[in-house]
Amino acid sequence: MLFLVRMDVNIPTDMPEEKAAEIKAVEKAYSQKLQHEGKWVSIWRVVGEYANYSVFNAQSNDELHEMISNLPLFPYMDIEVIPLAKHPSDIH
């Protein structure tokens, strides 16, 4: 199952920069692991915002929730999930 996910990141302004950098480094490693596994299909920045659109490939809603909730930045995100279905006009 494919899901389009928008993630808006809202790191508290009073968080020490060292802690934020550490969280971001762990987040990057985890996201790249999911990408290598084919579970995080693509990720796109939203220009001018600390946000992204990503496509996830998960076997279930529960698997998607587990992947997203394990993101180190999860506590600081507003997340919108849109389930995707194959379009009948798609030639791929």
Image (cartoon, rainbow, N blue to C red):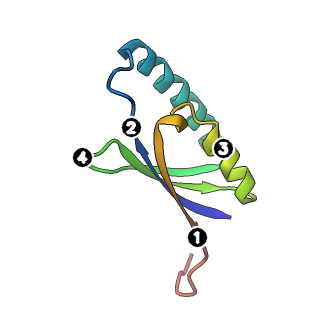
Q: Alpha carbon of mark 3 to alpha carbon of mark 4: how far? A: 26 Å
Sequence-wise, the earlier of marks 3 and 1 is 3
What amino acid type is highlighted by mark number 3?
Met
Residue beneath disc 1:
84
Is 56 drawn above or below residue 13 in the view shown? below
Q: Which mark is residue 10?
A: 2
Question: Are the residues flagged by discs 3 and 1 in contact, CB closer than 8 Å?
Answer: no
Which numbered dot is residue 48?
4
In the rendered image, the quadrant that contains the C terminus is bottom right
Reply above or below: 89 against 21: below
Outermost left residue: 48
What x and y, as percent, mark residue 60? 74, 59
Q: Residues within 10 Å of mark 2 (few under 14, many from 20)?
A: some
Q: Residue at x 38, y 15 (%)?
A: 16
Mark 2 or mark 3, whichever is nearer to me = 2
Report crowding for label 3: few under 14, some 14 to 19, many 20 or more residues within 10 A (C-alpha): some
| Amino acid under disc 2 | Asn
Separation of residues labelled 2 and 1 (CA atoms): 26 Å
Which is more N-terminal, label 1 or label 2?
2
